[in-house]
Amino acid sequence: MQFEIGPVIAAVRSAEEYAAALESGAETVFVVKSDLLSLREMLAEKRGKQVFVHADTCEGLGKDKVGLEVLSRLGADGVISTKNSLIAAAKGLGLGTVQRFFLIDSLSVQTAFESVSASRPDCAELMPGVLCKEIARFRARTQPFNVKIIAGGLIESKSDVIAALSAGADAVSVGRQELWYI
């Protein structure tokens, strides 16, 4: 399937958020939490939006080819999944595919690359999108507990170290030896 994505995709977790997304300027909607009964009603009205359903988190949906056929018949334009097998099955049904990856360290990056080269999704969603902001939020919420915060994973440069420390981390764990001396 060929599809266009705009710079902002509305990620929704409820029918109310879905309704708001239909009113927004976003061309694509990711339904990241749903159930099969609610999904039928939601997909009945798309207002020209492309709608992708996170198959891994849709309650009541079989996590197999038949489940994907159900999504297609309900009107989903595509699926989101972390699983190579679901991405391949969705592609076989002509659905758009977004494979989601949680990048926490260099090994997860390599694994994501290997998955993309094997499953060939239309899009790869890399998460988290913004970590420094979360460090700052976590710092604020845990202040009463006097917890030290260590940022780790995917730290590749001095600027990454500085960004994490500036966001509120007390320390940064790094595997790159050249960063052990800064």
Image (tube, grey):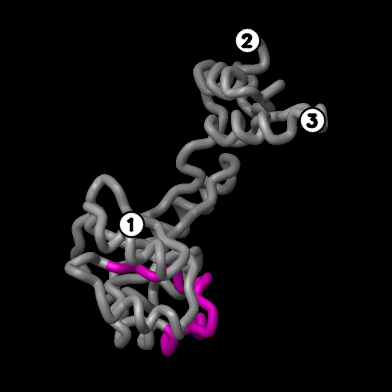
Q: Which dot, 2 or 3, sits closer to the camera?
A: 3
Q: Quadrant of residue 10?
A: bottom left
Q: Is residue 49 above or below residue 181?
A: below
The residue nearer to you, when weighing 179 against 143, is: 143
> In the image, which disc is placed on residue 144?
3
Going by the image, does 61 lie left or right of 30? right
> In the image, which disc is placed on residue 182?
2
Q: Is residue 5 above or below residue 55?
A: above
For disc 3, the neighbor class at 10 Å (few under 14, some 14 to 19, many from 20) is few
The x, y position of residue 31, in whole percent, is 40, 66
Q: For marks 3 and 1, give the CA distance.
A: 41 Å
Is residue 120 visible in this depiction of the protein? no
The x, y position of residue 87, in whole percent, is 40, 70
| Contact (Cβ within 8 Å) of mark 2 with mark 1 | no
Q: Is residue 127 above or below residue 117?
A: above
Q: Which dot, 3 or 1, sits closer to the camera?
A: 3
Q: Residue at x 67, y 16 (%)?
A: 180
- Quarter of the figure that contains the C terminus: top right
Residues rendered magenta in the picture: 51-67
The residue nearer to you, when weighing 76 against 96, is: 76
Is residue 116 visible in this depiction of the protein? yes
Q: Residue at x 59, y 41 (%)?
A: 105
Q: Is residue 7 above or below residue 24?
A: above
The x, y position of residue 82, in whole percent, is 49, 64
Going by the image, does 105 lie left or right of 98? right
Looking at the image, tell me whether mark 2 or mark 3 is earlier in sequence order.
Answer: 3
**Amino acid type, label 1:** Cys
Magenta-colored stretch includes residue 54? yes
Looking at the image, tell me whether mark 3 or mark 1 is earlier in sequence order.
Answer: 1
**Amino acid type, label 2:** Ile
Residue labelled with disc 1:
123
